[in-house]
Image (spheres, rainbow, N blue to C red):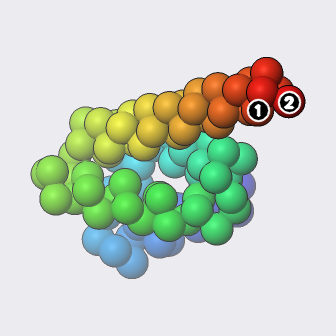
């Protein structure tokens, strides 16, 4: 087991969560995408928001996946609009 795995088990236990239900790779992907698309401090804040939204929607893995997908769609939309804005600035120059 890695130190990350150990941490997930310990933290989940402290919060009375089943670590087997956690999608660690999904959370890490979410954090990576947000950190690169927005800025680094947005990653943990977004992970918290996704967890909060998923908890309000029932807290099951499906709720987490839906909340994650919504945020990843937002990241993609923002990246698309940023790319379009950059292209417009180049064309206007």
What residue does disc 1 label? 89
Element on which disc 2 rests: loop
Identify the image quadrant of residue 6.
Answer: bottom right
- Mark pair 1, 2: CA separation: 6 Å
Quadrant including the C terminus? top right
Residue 67 rendering spot, x and y as whole percentages? 32, 44
Q: Mark 1, residues whose alpha carbon is within 10 Å: few (<14), some, or many (≥20)?
A: few
The residue lying at 37 percent from left, 54 percent from top is: 50
Element on which disc 1 rests: helix
What residue does disc 2 label? 93
Labels 1 and 2 touching (C-beta < 8 A):
yes
The residue lying at 44 percent from left, 32 percent from top is: 73
Residue 9 rendering spot, x and y as whole percentages? 49, 63
| Residue 54 appearing in the image | yes
Q: Mark 2, residues whose alpha carbon is within 10 Å: few (<14), some, or many (≥20)?
A: few
| Of 26 and 2, the residue lying toward us | 26
The residue lying at 24 percent from left, 42 percent from top is: 63
| Residue 20 appearing in the image | no
The residue lying at 14 percent from left, 51 percent from top is: 58
State which mark lies toward you, 1 or 2.
2
| Horizontal side of residue 52 vs 84, given as left or right | left
| Horizontal side of residue 61 vs 13, given as left or right | left
Residue 80 rendering spot, x and y as whole percentages? 59, 28
| Horizontal side of residue 64 vs 11, given as left or right | left
Residue 49 rendering spot, x and y as whole percentages? 37, 61
Residue extending furthest toward the front: 92
| Of 48 and 79, the residue lying toward us | 79
């Amino acid at each position: 087991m890695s130190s990350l795995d150990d941490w997930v088990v310990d933290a989940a236990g402290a919060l009375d969560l089943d670590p087997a239900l956690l999608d660690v790779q999904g959370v890490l992907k979410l954090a990576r995408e947000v950190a690169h698309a927005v800025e680094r401090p947005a990653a943990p804040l977004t992970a918290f928001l996704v967890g909060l939204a998923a908890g309000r929607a029932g807290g099951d893995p499906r709720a987490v996946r839906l909340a994650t997908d919504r945020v990843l769609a937002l990241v993609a939309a923002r990246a698309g609009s940023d790319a379009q804005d950059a292209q417009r600035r180049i064309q206007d120059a």
